[in-house]
Image (cartoon, rainbow, N blue to C red):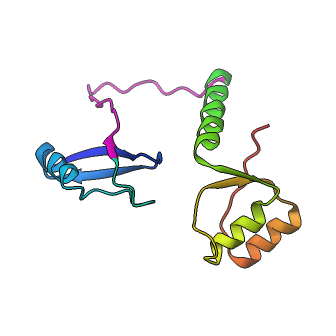
């Protein structure tokens, strides 16, 4: 059994389990692997670093300020690349997707507290991130 981290051309990452390397190659060639998020068939293996256990336990350390700043930057870059900025139309677009009026997609934007209450009342899942 071999496990690969995979990514579609739209940037969605997912995991694939295969009997062996040849099984993965064959399924890719036959276009049998698609993204579970968007059904894109343009799939590539993501680079990975194998973990080697030596029996020695590494010292865990708390993240420092530089780690936190780097993580924040990675999150901002990811959201900028993979989420459409709908600005003040966030609640409207979220409701349209929730009710099937428009296709589901990753969006970001701003909303008022009243709009957020409406989204919660309607059962729309969302989360707020303050990146300031």
Query: On the image, which quarter does residue 65 sit in?
Result: top right
Choose top left, top right, bottom left or bottom right for residue 111: bottom right
Q: Residue at x 82, y 56 (%)?
A: 88
Q: Is residue 6 left or right of residue 21?
A: right
Q: Which residues are magenta?
A: 43-64
Position of the C terminus by quadrant: top right
Q: Name the side, left or right, on which 11 lies relative to 101.
A: left
Residue 12: where, in percent of width, then height? 46, 49
Q: Let me know if residue 58 is in the magenta part.
A: yes
**Is residue 31 magenta-colored?**
no
Q: Position of residue 51 (x, y in %)?
A: 30, 31
- At 28% from the left and 56% from the top, the residue drawn is 33
Left or right: 129 in relation to 41:
right
Q: Which residue corresponds to the image point at 35% horizontal and 37% vertical from the top-left?
A: 46
Q: Position of residue 110 (x, y in %)?
A: 80, 54
Looking at this view, name the residue that lies furthest to the top. 66
Q: Nearer the viewer, residue 31 or 129?
A: 31
């Amino acid at each position: 059994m071999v496990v690969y981290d995979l990514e579609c051309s739209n940037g969605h990452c997912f995991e694939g389990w295969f009997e062996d390397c040849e099984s993965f190659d064959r399924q890719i060639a036959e276009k049998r692997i698609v993204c579970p998020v968007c059904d894109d068939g343009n799939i590539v293996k993501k680079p990975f670093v194998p973990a080697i256990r030596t029996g020695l336990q590494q010292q865990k350390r708390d993240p420092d300020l530089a780690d936190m700043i780097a993580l924040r930057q990675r999150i901002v870059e990811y959201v900028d690349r993979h989420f459409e900025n709908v600005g003040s139309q966030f609640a409207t677009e979220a409701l349209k997707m929730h009710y099937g009026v428009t296709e589901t997609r990753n969006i970001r934007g701003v909303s008022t507290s009243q709009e957020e209450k409406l989204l919660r009342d309607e059962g729309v899942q969302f989360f707020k991130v303050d990146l300031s």
